[in-house]
Amino acid sequence: MTENALKAKYNGGTLPIGYTIDSERHFQIDPLTAPFIAEAFRQYDEGATMTDILDYLNEKGVKNSRGLPLNYNSVQHLLKNRRYIGEYTYRDIIIPDGIPAIVSKDVFGRVQDRLSENKKAPARHKAEDDYLLTTKLFCGYCGAYLCGESGTSRTGNVHHYYKCVSVKKKRADCHKKPVKKDWIEDLVVNETMKMLSDDNVIEAIVSMLIDLQDRENTNLPMYEQQLRETETAIQNMLNAIQQGILTKSTKSRLEELENAKEDLESKISCEKLAKPRVGEEFLTFWLKRFRKLDVRQKSHRKMLIDTFINSIFLFDDKMVITFNYREGTTVIVFADLQAALAGRKVGSDLECLPAPKTKSPKGWLRFWLAQ
């Protein structure tokens, strides 16, 4: 690996967006994604925020190494990655211009200066973390993300909303109304807890996870099947010996089967040590522990949403939640919900107004906030 590093060859690990690896393990510019990286640096150099960059990259469909949408930390790491100016690094080996550069050193330097200045005001990132549904909440009409927005009224109260990106940027003819942050997050959390309270759902998820384990580890089921066949063959040979059938070939075949059995048992043990199998009882116990979460705590709410929510499509009159398990889709009609709440004499936020339009003494306080 040191020899590879001295030749500026790829040594494994996460491949930066914008690069591919050729047959000789050298870095090459990816013509599909590299232009988006160059544009991200240019926009940030010209005054765009990290959230603007995140919005741009996600809109263009740029994914991380696991095929998932980028988040705030992804953008921060991207803008600090010196490989984009051609610098190859492996442990203590640094080779300037060791790989093709995507960004000029002048632009990269100005971006680092701006990052250092913005580091003194971390409140933006702190506020961004409060929007728990970012990257999971979509507009039901145009399909765009709903991102966080806040506004300060003349009384000094800060109001938080999710607003469609198309409406915010006026990129499409979309008229989706903003929705209050606390109300929509409470509704999603409550529906998720309701889903987890159903034992049939827990059973379905456990069955899916067991099946996923079997499909991920193809060697173990194969070895176990071969072991069963070998043990059956050994038993047949022993039955034949008991009946008086004993020849040189019989003895030789029995020894081969015994050796094969030992070899398969060893392989099965190695597979189980390398990746222990999780049983149904443990999975059921683990899933049911989510029922005991305190949904008033932000960290518990975030854990619940990140684990079980796949996507949410929000309309003005209903919401479609897709959970992370097969056939896990729930449609919530707000009119029915409002009627139920009215029967219980509980107020609701179904009629959601946009952020205050009046200016405070300090002016607008708006952020594009995405996780």
Image (tube, rainbow, N blue to C red):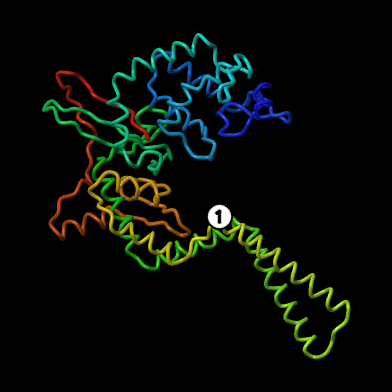
Q: Is residue 122 left or right of residue 280?
A: left
Look at the picture and state if 334 lies above or below 362: below
Identity, as a three-letter code, of the amino acid under mark 1: Lys
366 vs 98, nearest the viewer: 98
Quadrant location, the C terminus: top left
The residue lying at 73 percent from left, 31 percent from top is 23
Measured as percent of width and height from the top left, residue 263 is found at 71, 63
In which quadrant of the rendered view does residue 7 lie? top right
Residue that carries the numbered disc 1 in the rendered image: 275
The residue lying at 24 percent from left, 24 percent from top is 365
51 vs 170, nearest the viewer: 51
Measured as percent of width and height from the top left, residue 304 is found at 34, 50
In which quadrant of the rendered view does residue 345 lie? bottom left
| Count of marks overlaid on the render | 1
Quadrant location, the N terminus: top right
112 vs 175, nearest the viewer: 112
The residue lying at 67 percent from left, 64 percent from top is 223
Q: Is residue 268 left or right of residue 46?
A: right
